[in-house]
Image: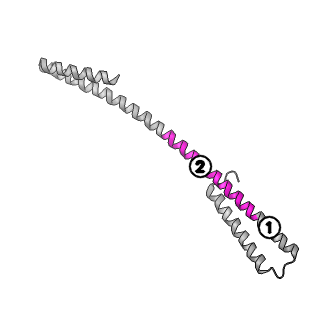
Amino acid sequence: MPDASADQLFDLADQIALISSELLRFRLRQRASLSATDRTRLEAAEVALDQACAQMRAQGITALARQSKAARDEVASTAQAAEAQLRRLKKIERVLAIAASALGLAQAAMAGKPKDITQALGQLKTAISTSV
C-alpha cells in the first residue's frame, strides 16, 4: 500500500486488530470443542494478524514521517518566499525614502530657504547612505 495515507494505514491496522480480537474470542469460546490442530491454526492466524497489524502501524508511522517532512519542506519554501518578498519591500521602502527626501529638497529649493535646503540635503544624503 505505497500510496495509502497514514490515516488509511492506521484504520486498516485497527480493523486487523479487531479481526484478531474476534478470532481470539471465538477460540476461547470454542476451546472445549476445538481439536488441538484447530487451536494451533487459530493461534497461528491470530499471530499472523497481529504481525500484519504491527506492520500496518509501522507503515502508518512511516507515512506520517513523509507527510511531516513534506509539510516542513513546504513551510521552509514558503518562509524563503516570504523573506524574498520582504527584501523586495525593503528595497521599495528605501527607494521611497530617497524619493521623499528628493521631493523635500525640491520643495526647499523652490521656497528658496537656504536653511531648509541644507536640512533637506542632509536628509537626502542620509536616505541614500542607508539604502546602500
Q: Please, is residue 31 above or below residue 2 in the view?
A: below
Q: Secondary structure at mark 2?
A: helix
Q: What is the basis of the colouring in this image?
A: one colour
Q: Position of residue 3 (x, y in %)?
A: 67, 51
The one nearer the camera, 59 or 88, is 59
To which residue does mark 1 refer?
Answer: 45
- At label 1, the amino acid type is Ala
Whichever of labels 2 and 1 marks the residue nearer the N terminus, that label is: 1
The answer to which image quadrant residue 43 occupies is bottom right
Is residue 42 shown above or below 129?
below
Q: Quadrant of residue 51?
A: bottom right
At a point 32% along the width and 30% down the height, the residue shown is 93
In the image, taking residue 76 as reference, residue 42 lies left or right, namely: right
In the image, residue 69 above or below residue 80: below
Question: Which residue appears at 84% of the width and 82% of the height?
Answer: 33
Residue 31 position in % (x across, y down): 81, 79
Q: Would you place residue 62 above or below residue 90 in this image?
A: below
Viewer-closest of 41 and 91:
41
The region drawn magenta spans 49-78
Q: Is residue 56 one of those drawn in magenta? A: yes
> How packed is label 1: few (under 14 Cα within 10 Å), some, or many (20 or more)?
some
Q: Residue at x 73, y 64 (%)?
A: 50
Label 2 vs label 1, nearer the camera? 1
The outermost residue toward the bottom is: 32
Which label number is shown at residue 7? none
Query: Residue at label 2?
Result: 67
Principal SS element in the magenta part?
helix
* Callout 1: SS: helix
The three-letter amino acid code for the residue at tag 2 is Gln
The quadrant of the rendering that contains the N terminus is bottom right
